[in-house]
Amino acid sequence: MFELQLHDLDGKPIDQVAAYTVAVALRRALCLHLGIEETEVGALAASSRTIDKKQKIASIYLYDTVTGGAGYSTQIVAHLSALLRQARQILECPRHCDAACQSCLLTHDTQHHLDDLNRHTAIALLSDDFLAALELPESLRVFGPKSQLEMEPLILALNREWQHIMPTQLRVYLGGKTQDWELLAWRLRDDLTRWRKTGATIQLIVPATAFSKLNSSQRDEWAALIAYTGAELYRAPDLSKVADLPLIMELGSANQQMRWAASKLNALIPGPHWGSGENGGPFVRTSESQALSPLPNQWKRLSLDELRPVMMPSSIALSISSELNGSSATFGERTWTFLEQRIPALAKRLRGTTPLQSVHYSDRYLCSPLTFVLLHELLNGLTCYSGGLAKSTPIEITTAELNRLDAKQPRLLSHDWRDSEDRRQAIETWFTETWPNFKWREMPLQKLPHARELTLTWNNNDCWIIRLDQGLGYWGIAPGLRPEFPFDYDVAQQIEKLRKNCFLLEPLNPGYPTYWHCSQLKQ
């Protein structure tokens, strides 16, 4: 189904008559464009509210009449401006009727809604000035006469075009301030994996200047992203532009290509807002009946080894894949046994007589109950050691303020909290039950380092830092298990669920390991 909310040039919501009349004319324009019968697409107008919920408005709806849908109605988005112009022509009735007739608006279904049809009302809405406002300004016509405004978020646009041209290649161009990059929270990440499985080549292109500014944690994230998605990473000499606008995306098949440009550089930042238009929009696109040109030879493809940061000689890098699989209740026990066996110096410290002076864990992405279950078990595993966690040891958790973008109702243990206060109260109460000196700290995302680090400090300033390249988000719940979480219940019930949760853990992507970098610091 396609929904459209129109306002007049003064910004006022339209009424039922204008909405239904435009819906009928727009349907005819769409069916003429697609070469289908009008009976295959339904049209209606219904009372609704504007996006900000402040005003009543009559929404326009077009929908497929065939059970299961043929996807006709959703195709209107890509051609909306042109179809509205064609709808205006349809409203100019060749018989110059008073309101509606068989030559313009009356059909088998609309003849029963004569009171809601008035072509003059719709013409007044779709005026010359209104249609002119839909035209691209000259500054956005970077692809020439074929430049079109992209009406959908880029992920939806990609899904739309993917169905039409059967692509063999996708290129995504990245840029903007590297300190704002959030590769593992990039909204395109899972889609890249899905598209790669179709056999298409996925190429991610980064300017050399941006790549040189990446810190070690961000390089870890790149390595994880490339392994997770199967994409190829290229380092380009400069930012790719079309006229004065940054190129953001290209999609190509054997004989067709689609290209998109952004209005501003910050649109190229990979993160949860990518492609939404909130940052760096609007977007413009074009299409050509030819394949994409090959990438220039001087654009270097980077291997996983080139992506991973160069570590200090004293740092110990551990590769982990299936070693920690098993019950969530013993995740901490398995983790510290694994570390003991591979790092004798850390094992000696944990089995010493002096307990930890403090523990600190910093992670931007502690958003779901699942990650906190794993973190609680990880810390709980340290209580088994004489040189580990004592009940009085201060523990501090630092994470980012909650910024939940997904409008869907959270339901599963792996979903993110939508209420920041619920998250804080649940975790503070639960962790303080075991460790009275627990401290919760939230910061704006941009002020937190990218590194996900666990810092263990003893009273002689002996300190171990364990950097988790993918944090605790590397693990998920084994397939077939979908434990739910009572997000809509009070905090006490949420805590009870956290206490009692027990499930089987395994990597979300078992084909690629996570890397933990362990280093000892003595001050």
Image (cartoon, rainbow, N blue to C red):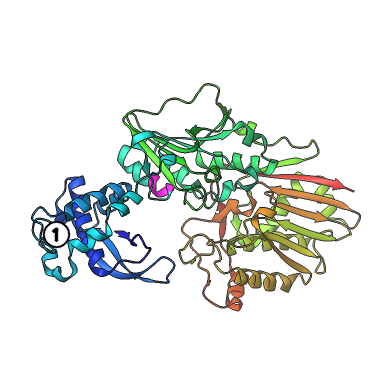
Query: Is 346 above or below relative to 3?
Result: above
Please tell me whether the stretch drawn in magenta is mainly helix, strand or loop: helix
Query: Is 297 above or below relative to 195?
Result: above
Quadrant into which the N terminus falls = bottom left
Is any atom of residue 511 visible in this view? no
Q: Which residue is disc 1 drawn over?
A: 105
Left or right position of 315 against 168: right
Left or right position of 81 against 521: left
Give the total number of marks visible in the rendering. Answer: 1
Asked if residue 160 lies in the magenta stretch, the reply is no
User: Picture quarter containing residue 424?
Assistant: bottom right
Q: Which residues are magenta?
A: 154-158
Q: Residue at x 20, y 56 (%)?
A: 25
Q: Residues within 10 Å of mark 1 (few under 14, many from 20)?
A: many
Q: Position of residue 502 (x, y in %)?
A: 58, 65
Q: Position of residue 413 (x, y in %)?
A: 54, 64
